[in-house]
Image (cartoon, grey):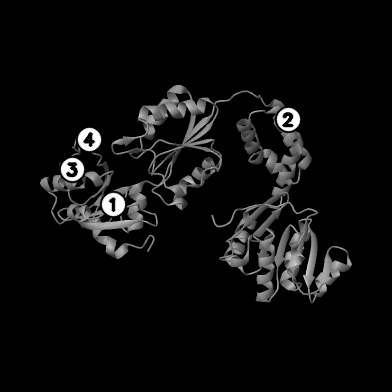
Amino acid sequence: MDYFPLFANLHNRPCLVVGAGHIAARKIDLLLRAGAQVTVVALAINAAIAQLASEKKLAVIEKAFSPDDVLGFMLVVSATDNADTNQAVAAAADAQHIFVNVVDSPALCSFILPAIIDRAPLMVAVSSGGAAPVLARLLRAKIESVVPPTYGRLAQLAEKFRGAVKQRISAPEQRRIFWENIFQGSVAEKVYAGNSLQAEQELLQTLADYENTATQGEVYLIGAGPGAADLLTFRALRLMQQADVVVYDHLVSPEVLDLARRDCEKIYVGKQRQNHSLPQDSINRLLADLAKSGKRVVRLKGGDPFIFGRGGEEIETLMQEGIAFQVVPGITAASGCASYAGIPLTHRDHAQSCTFVTGHLKDDSINLNWTQLAAPNQTIVVYMGSMGLEKICQSLMAHGSPADLPIALIQQGTTRTQRVYTGTLSTLPAQIAQEKISPPTLIIIGTVVSLHKQLGWFRGGE
């Protein structure tokens, strides 16, 4: 985080603008809209600023800037085309510990003026930290298109009844759920339609009917996908944003976890080889207990929860306890990693079927139907197989697979650290032994792997 996002109350606060050209006029307009008491220091004043001064909306001092001019101000903006003046303004403000913005000079700024979406009292600000202001404005335009102007009226409704709701619903978590239902339900729709009176009446009726007692929560079993945050589904993102608790494993990428509600509790229950932070039975119990305490719980699992994710075991416990739940599928590692590696799982010239297996070693053995897996014209995808790679290759060759059968190991697929290692059953184990492999990994076996050089399109962090 290069800049700390902060909304400042400038109402009746003294603010200084150095410069009085067209750029300065735009900054002055923003400050006046925020209720600031604006003073302008400049040698020459343009017509628009002179008009504002004549209307007593700001004070103008026609003179060259001097360091003492910053004294007594809460915030300073320098908007001149003179580099020496801008440097002097920044130095004077810094010496007095006053926030300063120098237009188009991020290195001289202690704060950045963002691109703004104004739905007062709701405000959205977008900043690139001065690195790409045009990109920030383009993003603002996208947000403008999906945030209707009526959101401001919805915020005003919440402000009007905030005290009454707090008095009626004492528990903060239950209060948050109440407001989320209001903002996403028929009350909000009435506000959008301009029926504010009906919206207020319905909100009051909903509040009057509300029972301020502990309610049982719900569990959302969500597939986090193979790693890339933008591969999450819309539903997954929506539920993550309203969760009270997120229970996650070691296959969930930090980028995905960052999309959860900022103030939710996060509980790590990852299971790695010979290092289980919580056994599965304890995870099942934890989910049930959290939901019974009234919390909305996201169980975030890498890939898809029903493909080697033990999601079925977790919802069995929830069903036995009578706890409401939802299952949100995710892009499984086989599909995501194969796509990003340019390896089709099926292809009419190579494979007419695809089999998913787990290569997780138990007691130094892998119990798989090797005869079936060694059959030609298919693709084999092995989850959790990196530690047993040599044994997998040896077993397949022992059951009839050719030694030159192509095989790929994909490290951290779909992310910027993705690496794809290719070889054959006879060569890949020795090749991988020379590499420092970072999980999660996925193994793909079959002649489809030969298409990687032709179809590989994703270059990760290269």
Find residue 301 and report its horizontal and vertical position in percent. 41, 40
Q: Are marks 4 and 1 in contact (CB under 8 Å)?
A: no
Give the labeled residue for mark 1: 437
Residue 446, visible in the rendered structure: no
SS at circle 1: loop
Give the labeled residue for mark 4: 362
How many angstroms separate mark 1 from mark 2 (CA)?
Answer: 59 Å
Q: Who comes first in sequence, dot 4 or dot 3? A: 4
Give the labeled residue for mark 3: 372
Asked if 155 appears above or below 461 in the picture, the reply is above
Q: Left or right: 222 with respect to 45?
A: left
Question: Of the residues shown, which amino acid type is indicated by label 3?
Answer: Gln
What is the crowding at mark 2: few (fewer than 14 residues within 10 Å), some, or many (at least 20)? few
SS at circle 4: loop
Q: Who comes first in sequence, dot 4 or dot 2? A: 2
Front of the two marks 1 and 2: 1
SS at circle 2: helix
Along the line of sight, which residue is nearer the eye, 383 or 36?
36
Front of the two marks 4 and 2: 4
